[in-house]
């Protein structure tokens, strides 16, 4: 039995997409980010911070999206989504899997500042500008890595790309795509993957993020 605990629009999308890429049968338990449902005791027993994703598999529960993606890559090596220890691209694979969280944390900060903080006067223009500059730096690293290739590694599509997909469209909510042709093309390739489309449909989302652009305030 495989069961994924998931919120639409959250990092659990990485795992939902991975399950579809792997062609696995699974149950989906959905929560909302805005109604306190992630504080239910049954989820807290699986994920101590009351956060998604949590994946029940092989008689155990695993939390943290990066850990789950690494586990799935190793648990199902025949799918070719992982990079084996000792091989040439292993270090690069691990770098991108974990770099995805560095970038996601910046995006989370920007989401809080632009969207969730109320009233608007509670928001910090200085923090928003700082975090946007930090986001640009991460996008520049991705842009350079994607020069001359479709995916982050020479090997092709891997779990590193599964981790990064949650971030890519969100980046373009805060940074315009000018100067990021490789990253924009990468986002388009992600959107064309059948498993990605199935994951969005299973989650009940037409797109992972809206395409609204959030302007920086003056200050």
Image: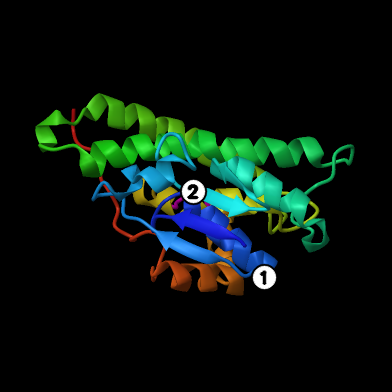
Q: Is residue 153 above or below residue 90?
A: below
Picture coordinates of residue 6 (x, y %)? 44, 55
Residue at 12%, 37% in the rendered image: 120
Residue 92 falls within the magenta-colored stretch? no
Picture coordinates of residue 123 (x, y %)? 19, 31
Q: Residues within 10 Å of mark 2 (few under 14, many from 20)?
A: many
Q: Is residue 161 left or right of residue 206?
A: right
Element under label 1? Answer: loop
Residue at 42%, 34% in the rendered image: 49
- The quarter of the displayed image where residue 99 is located: top right
Residue at 43%, 66% in the rendered image: 203
Picture coordinates of residue 5 (x, y %)? 47, 54
Q: Is residue 49 above or below residue 4?
A: above
Q: Is residue 59 left or right of residue 51?
A: right
* Residue tagged 1: 23
Q: Main secondary structure of the magenta part?
A: loop
Element under label 2? Answer: loop
- Which stretch appears magenta? 177-181
Numbered tag placed on residue 53 in the rendering? 2
């Amino acid at each position: 039995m495989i069961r994924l605990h998931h919120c639409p629009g959250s990092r659990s999308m990485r795992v939902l997409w991975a399950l579809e890429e792997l062609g696995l049968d699974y149950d989906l338990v959905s929560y909302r980010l805005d109604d306190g449902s992630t504080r239910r005791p049954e989820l807290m027993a699986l994920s101590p911070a009351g956060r998604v994703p949590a994946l029940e598999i092989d008689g155990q529960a695993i939390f943290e999206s990066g850990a789950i993606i690494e586990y799935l890559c190793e648990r199902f090596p025949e799918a070719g989504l992982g990079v084996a220890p000792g091989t040439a691209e292993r270090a690069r694979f691990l770098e991108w899997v974990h770099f995805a969280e560095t970038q996601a944390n910046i995006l989370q900060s920007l989401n809080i500042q632009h969207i969730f903080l109320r009233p608007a006067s509670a928001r910090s223009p200085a923090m928003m500008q700082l975090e946007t500059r930090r986001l640009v730096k991460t996008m520049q690293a991705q842009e350079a890595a994607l020069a001359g290739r479709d995916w982050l590694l020479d090997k092709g599509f891997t779990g590193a790309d599964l981790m990064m997909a949650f971030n890519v469209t969100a980046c373009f909510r805060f940074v315009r795509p000018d100067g990021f042709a490789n990253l924009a093309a990468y986002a388009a390739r992600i959107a064309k993957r059948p498993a990605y489309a199935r994951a969005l449909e299973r989650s009940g989302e037409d797109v992972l993020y809206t395409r609204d652009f959030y302007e920086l305030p003056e200050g």
